[in-house]
Amino acid sequence: MVDFTLTDEQKNLREVAHDFAEKEMRPVAWEYDRDSVWPENVIKKAWEVGLMNNHIPEEYGGVGLGYLDGCVIEEELAWGCSGIQTSVGCNGLATAPLILGGSHELKKEYLGRLTEAPLLASFCLTEPDAGSDVSGMKTTAVKKGDKWVINGSKCFITNGSHANFYTVYAKTDKDAGHRGISAFIVPRDAGVVVDKKEDKMGQRASNTATISFNDVEIPADHLIGEENKGFKLAMMTLDRTRPGVAAMATGIARAAMEFAIDYSKERVQFGVPIAMHQAIQFIIADMATEVEASRLLTWKAAFQLDNGERNTLVSSHAKRFAADTAMRVATDAVQVYGGYGFIKEYPVEKLMRDAKIMQLYEGTAQIQRLVIARETLLPRRAETPAAATA
Ligand code: CAA
């Protein structure tokens, strides 16, 4: 039977995450956003209380939480501040390919680094000329003896300025399109150059950087999985991480809705709190429905993964719907605040700026629709995750 009840453990995780969001993130969120402050102190605390890296299997020093567990945590932390959460949660994205396809030795070394100290890793797929079109990447990796030599540039890299190591996708066969891409672990001290930190519209506390590789040499065994199988590894990674983005979008939407509800009960116009006006009630009603629906799609996408099923379609449903919901709800929250919503002194304009990135990163709203259309019009063979890497 279908059951939407969280286990006691999941309820406890939610409580711990909510408490952290309320006490450690909210008090600094608006200031860090305004000044674009790197939230190193919050990241350290999140690591100490066990709210980072919880996807890492026990064998490699982690606690091996499931995808639904992760989504429950991510919604709460994004409710606190989605900018800080983008940096806190990025290790999950960066290490997903390693967990999926890496050798035991590579996992031991690099997952171990993250569980032993509050270090960060980055996921490097996007390039200046290859965003949605992953196969168009130009970064190359050439085998020379017992080394790979990497050249190229990656942009929009979360935590790029601060990462200890990078999961990098590069062409290993320039003429083979998506079948000529491989994935690698590149330690920062191999010579990764941070070119610039972006000055962003929203999520200003998270770090987003352009980085480059100029004849960066890494050991041959730093290839993740098989040569030329990197594209599928990237797609399978995004299937696993998009539910987390959807959970974050749900957290932003919920935060915006809560602010709108509180404000609508305080703000008096025409002699009554504006919550008494049907025009406002209908806005709040739509917010409540869409937040609920976002969470349900998110949980379904995560549940499928926990159940060993391929979740490509539902993952894109969740990411697309929750991201669009975050944008709509945050925009409507500004509407409920009226002119005050447009002023930085009030909380909701930050949420509107933060929500925008949810429709852009980890696959734009249009890419999600492309995946949904393909999976709906021409469903792929039902594969288990293990079969898809073969
Ligand atoms: N799982 C397993 N295999 C998959 C798959 C999946 N979900 N999706 C596709 N594949 C396989 C296909 O079966 C096909 O296999 P064969 O080689 O055997 O034929 C192969 O991959 C190619 O598939 P497509 O023909 O569908 O590939 P495409 O070139 O048309 O691209 C796409 C598809 C959906 C547009 C994809 O390129 C995509 O998702 N683009 C968006 C990229 C993205 O999300 N970037 C975000 C970067 S991360 C980030 O933002 C984080 C940050 O730090 C800011």
Image (cartoon, rainbow, N blue to C red):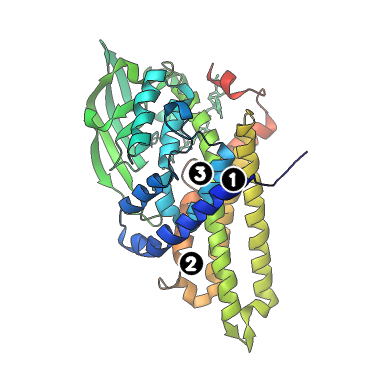
> Which quarter of the figure is the N terminus placed in?
top right
Q: Position of residue 90 (x, y in %)?
A: 41, 41
Residue density around tag 1, few if under 14, some if 14–19, many if 20 or more, within 10 Å: some
N-term mark: 1 or 2: 1
How far apart, in angstroms, are the residues tagged by discs 3 and 2? 23 Å
Q: Position of residue 126 (x, y in %)?
A: 39, 36
Residue density around tag 2, few if under 14, some if 14–19, many if 20 or more, within 10 Å: many
How far apart, in angstroms, are the residues tagged by discs 1 and 2? 29 Å
How far apart, in angstroms, are the residues tagged by discs 1 and 3? 30 Å
Q: Within the image, what quadrant is residue 107 found in?
A: top left
Q: Which residue is mark 2?
A: 348
**From the viewer's perspective, is the residue at label 1 or at label 2 nearer?**
1
Q: Which residue is mark 3?
A: 364
The residue shown at (62%, 29%) is 310
Q: With respect to residue 281, does 295 lie above or below?
A: above
Q: Are marks 1 and 2 in contact (CB under 8 Å)?
A: no
Q: With respect to residue 288, does 382 lie above or below?
A: above
Secondary structure beneath dot 3 equals: loop
Q: Which residue is mark 1?
A: 10
N-term mark: 1 or 3: 1
